Image: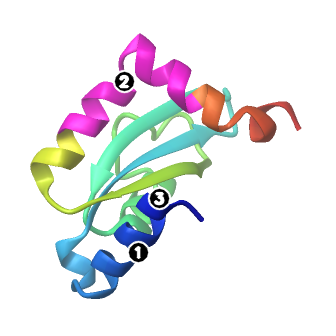
Amino acid sequence: MSFRAVLLYCLIRTLRPSEVLGTYILQSKKDKLFYTGYTNDLKERIELHNNGKIASTKNRLPVTLVYYEACLNQQDATHREKYLKTAWGKRYVKSRLKNYLTG
């Protein structure tokens, strides 16, 4: 585990779950496309997606979580979400998920 990951883990352990926001990426099992968003309750958000309550993914169900990054505030989470939606961000995610996507 990297130093950054250990540090983030230690910080998150001291916070309540509602204080930790995260940027997440879902992949549709129907069309294999990705959806990127952020939330402070990942489990609930994925349930909303899979129950068809989110307009962006309701016609692409089911979806599976393929990537998640924890952030300590909303501004960081929204900035990270915006970056991951850019061409550079998509390349970053694909390189991180290389084994998952090819295996």
Tell me how far mark 1 sits from mark 2, CA to CA: 25 Å
* Numbered tag placed on residue 9 in the rendering: 1
Q: Tag 3, which secondary structure?
A: loop
Q: Amino acid at mark 1?
A: Tyr
| Horizontal side, residue 98 vs residue 11: left or right | right
The spot of residue 85 in percent (x, y) is: 36, 23
Residue at (20%, 63%) from the top-left corner? Answer: 72
Residue that numbered label 3 is attached to: 51
Q: Tag 1, which secondary structure?
A: helix
* Numbered tag placed on residue 25 in the rendering: none
Front of the two marks 3 and 1: 1
Residues at circles 3 and 2 in contact by the CB criterion of under 8 Å: no
* Numbered tag placed on residue 85 in the rendering: 2
Q: Amino acid at mark 2?
A: Lys
The spot of residue 20 in percent (x, y) is: 24, 69
Q: Is residue 80 magenta?
A: yes
